[in-house]
Image (cartoon, rainbow, N blue to C red):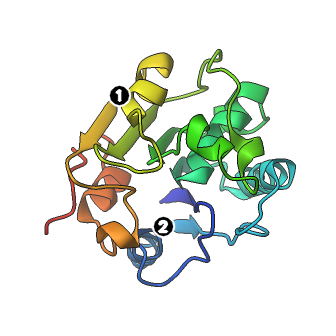
Amino acid sequence: MTAYLILHGWQNHRPEDHWQHWLADRLTELGHQVTYPQLPDPDDPELEVWLSELARHLDALDADSERVVVAHSLSAVLWLHAAARGLPGLAAVDRVLLVAPPSGAVLARYPEVAEFALPALEFTLPGPTRLVAGDDDPYCEEGAGTAYGDPLALPTDILPGAAHLDLDAGYGSWPAVLHWCLDPTATIIARPA
């Protein structure tokens, strides 16, 4: 059994059609421990509150299982904030998938999430981390590889035409992310059209 923590992004109220909900359901059906919390105030989040929630949920993961975090959008940036601060519990996570993190320049444009913009990427991630993003993500105009992958030396998968990897981009089910959850060597590809 693996313990999964799935974290959503800004303005996400965990709609049942979203790939994260689909993923949580599939992993649960396979007998894994899955935590997919609704983070507080998703429309007007506070960084300190979300960091506290992240720490709480990490502490609750089964210590005898492999621990995997899948973070989308604003929660991918949340994970980076936690790493920059050395948040306790991060080092106990076995692997992380950061999906479609928005760039600092984009976050700075929105008062509700401006405090999530990272001042600098001058830290080391505590464990194996992979980045996946669309090549045309409107929330990361310079490209996730340039904004995050290269500075943090992350293995990065850039998916053509995948935009923000959300419902608007057609990401309800996403078999490739399920395959990666079950096998970290699996290739993450775009959802079939």
Relative to residue 125, is residue 115 drawn left or right?
right
Q: Residue at x 61, y 20 (%)?
A: 121
Query: Who comes first in sequence, dot 1 or dot 2?
Result: 2
Relative to residue 150, is residue 175 drawn left or right?
left
- Classed neighbour count for the residue bearing mark 1: other residues with Cα under 10 Å, few (<14), some (14–19), many (≥20): few
Q: Amino acid at mark 1?
A: Pro
Q: Secondary structure at mark 1?
A: loop
> Circle 2 is placed at which residue position?
32
Q: In this view of the protein, which residue sits in the foreground, 6 or 17?
A: 17
Q: Is residue 185 visible?
A: no
Q: Is residue 160 above or below residue 84?
A: below
> Residue 42 falls in which quadrant of the image?
bottom right
Tag 1–tag 2 contact (CB < 8 Å): no
Q: Secondary structure at mark 2?
A: loop
Q: Nearer the viewer, mark 1 or mark 2?
A: 1
Residue 166's tag is none
Q: In this view of the protein, which residue sits in the foreground, 53 or 146?
A: 146
Q: Is residue 18 above or below residue 78?
A: below
> Residue 50 falls in which quadrant of the image?
bottom right
- Hey, which residue is sitting farthest front in the picture? 109
Q: Is residue 56 visible?
A: yes
Q: Residue at x 61, y 42 (%)?
A: 77
> Circle 1 is placed at which residue position?
155
Q: Residue at x 37, y 29 (%)?
A: 145
Percent position of residue 76, x then y: 56, 46
Relative to residue 158, is residue 69 drawn left or right?
right
Percent position of residue 73, x then y: 53, 53
Q: In this view of the protein, which residue sits in the foreground, 169 or 152?
A: 169
- Classed neighbour count for the residue bearing mark 2: other residues with Cα under 10 Å, few (<14), some (14–19), many (≥20): some
Percent position of residue 90, x then y: 68, 36
Q: Residue at x 14, y 65 (%)?
A: 192
Using the numbered discs, state the Cα–Cα distance from disc 1 to disc 2 in whole angstroms.
Answer: 25 Å
